[in-house]
Amino acid sequence: MSLFKLETQDSKARAGTLTTTHSTIPTPVFMPVGTRAAVKSMTSEDLESLGAQIILGNTYHLYLRPGAELIEKLGGLHQFMAWKKSILTDSGGFQVYSLSDLNKVTDDGVWFQSHIDGSKHFIGPRESMEIQRALGSDIVMCFDECPALPATTEILKKSLEKTHRWAKTCREFELKNHQHLFGIVQGGLDLKLRMESLQALEELNFPGLAIGGLSVGEKNEEMKELLQAFVSHMPTEKPRYLMGVGKPLDILEAVKAGVDMFDCVLPTRNARNGQMLTSRGPLNIKNERFKDDQNPPDPDCHCRVCQRYTRAYIRHLITVGEYTAGQLTTYHNLHFYLRMMEDIRKSILEKRFDEFYRNFYNKFTSNNF
Amino acid sequence: MSLFKLETQDSKARAGTLTTTHSTIPTPVFMPVGTRAAVKSMTSEDLESLGAQIILGNTYHLYLRPGAELIEKLGGLHQFMAWKKSILTDSGGFQVYSLSDLNKVTDDGVWFQSHIDGSKHFIGPRESMEIQRALGSDIVMCFDECPALPATTEILKKSLEKTHRWAKTCREFELKNHQHLFGIVQGGLDLKLRMESLQALEELNFPGLAIGGLSVGEKNEEMKELLQAFVSHMPTEKPRYLMGVGKPLDILEAVKAGVDMFDCVLPTRNARNGQMLTSRGPLNIKNERFKDDQNPPDPDCHCRVCQRYTRAYIRHLITVGEYTAGQLTTYHNLHFYLRMMEDIRKSILEKRFDEFYRNFYNKFTSNNF
């Protein structure tokens, strides 16, 4: 069975289905981030009740703790965290660059020091594949280099050359039968480089492709333009994954350009700081004005949090620092994202995505709480 | 309808039913502690699924944040925290003595400084009743003085006199119709003083009585002896609540002496430190030996955590500091307590409490994980 089936296109926006041995995933899809074998403040039961079909795990974190060997010994990441549906793991590359004390990038990979205990490690394309194979995720990402933007064309070109060489090493590695390897297109904001990168990866014929190196410091408008110009050149029959994106309106914009898959820590991380996403925009529940507000966080939301709790109560919990606060705000925010993706998909299937986008945008930017 | 109905006695151990307007509570009962309008790491849905019929709220904390006036304005504590079953609130007395910067105990109450912002406050019996009335809890506790043990007889006597005078003030206060006021027997480890205290409170004819001032520094054996000597003198027809107790074996001991109600932070607080209670004793899930242990925390437990997750996984979560860890360990520990109370009750109804106690004790002290 093929990994991806495109069902409908409404202009460039796409509705499809990803099928792994663990679940059937309607697209466009948002993948909650479960960095250390848990989506923060959520249990696997919570994720099931939210209807998540796929979550993301971070190779860098899992490699350091509890270690890929241990997870493999315990039956793989699915069994370890008691999650029966799909898992995508990143390559560890991004975190090696952003979290660790970086020692040295060589032609073969990266020497780095753990951000936890300073211990020395090496991860290159081969090591990343070994770890992800041990984790047993359904979708495996190539180990790439991800230069910070803005970057000169020269830096981007050198980086690209390395990324493509590493992609080849990854592609030649034998993963488990149920695993699918995605290539990662790099090239910054340079359409020509992106096209070169796409061509190089297409020669390796990955079952899916990701767009890496965006949402790393460039302007929002620049990302939008690059996506509009580039995404439709990607092969129609393969899933397209925009890594690390993003805010609700960024996702809408990327869907409009033809992207199928997303992940971002925003709904979970911001939840813990009191930002609750609502149909009328992001609401800072810590705000004094919600002190005696008996409305649910989002009156238009049907999640179990909005059906039961008031803004005043959640504000109280987060103000005093109760653990329960993060559970309620995270659940709601993930519900918001997953329902948004459902609604987007429905509008594409019904060929009214533009109208949906307009309505969503107008309401979401109203801030009329 | 009367608050309490005694169903069976097996020697001194009692099985009964507490009935409030919010729920029917089989006794002996353990009340999870929801200090600041939330049981830490639990949602109200979690507590429902655990089968909790009554929880405890702390007057001192709620008075300081978010304030009793606000909670009353928002419909009372039940509505505020979206908890439909019963709530018992303590008087605030214990926390005033133990948490705040104590300024001065007068004949009428206590001047103290908030442990949060240093602001000055006064709570006496009248103020405690006003706050608990505003909170709208089902069971309201008298404002008492709780001297630390050991204490001289003279100190205890003076304190008792004050506690009884304050109890009278509380009793004369008009609470809401659905609220039941409990008197608190003090007197330390001195049986004679305890009997005097009981007599003084009985003159005020409270619908329920608590035993205060235990588990505050005395030896375990001393508490056990006092309970065995004292509890059976308390009126048969009234519920008996042992405040702040305790460990599983302490509870068994107190049930054996005739106590009906308990509360303690132990299952929730220790959960966050990695102590999971099992039928074979307390298990420190952080222990290295559980690193690759694929057993559930307690193989004899039927809670949703033990049905799904391994020791290895929970150990990982708590080691790396994931929020989800506290959710899983807390849920399990509360399940352990609530099932223990169910089992105790069943054994009393079937007149085999002593046998149950023996078996529970032997298994619980085996530490055979």
Image: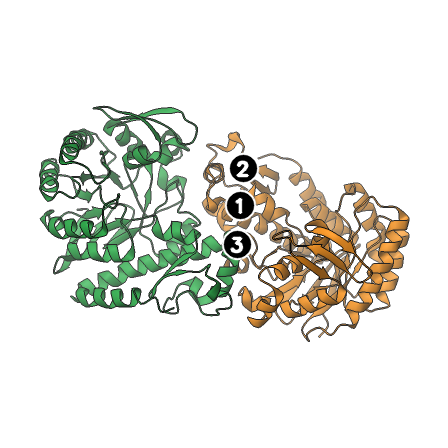
Chain colours: A green, B orange
Circles 1 and 2: CB atoms closer than 8 Å: yes
Instruction: Say which residue label 3 marks.
Output: B42
Instruction: Say which residue label 2 marks.
Output: B285
> In which chain is the residue bearing label 1?
B
Q: Residues within 10 Å of mark 3 (few under 14, many from 20)?
A: many
Q: Quadrant of residue B126?
A: bottom right
Residue A292: x %, y % from top left: 51, 68
Q: How many angstroms separate mark 1 from mark 2 (CA)?
A: 9 Å
Residue kind at label 1, given as amino acid type: Thr
Residue kind at label 2, given as amino acid type: Ile
Residue in view at x 86 percent, y 68 percent: B203
Left/right of residue B347 with respect to residue A57 in the rendered view: right
Q: Are marks 1 and 3 on the same chain?
A: yes
Residue kind at label 3, given as amino acid type: Met
Instruction: Say which residue label 1 marks.
Output: B329
**Observer-nearest of B107 and A269:** B107
Q: Residues within 10 Å of mark 1 (few under 14, many from 20)?
A: many
Q: Which element carries disc 1, helix, strand or loop?
A: helix
Residue B235: x %, y % from top left: 82, 63
> In which chain is the residue bearing label 2?
B
**Observer-nearest of B349 and A231:** A231
Query: In the rendering, which numbered label is found on residue B273?
Result: none
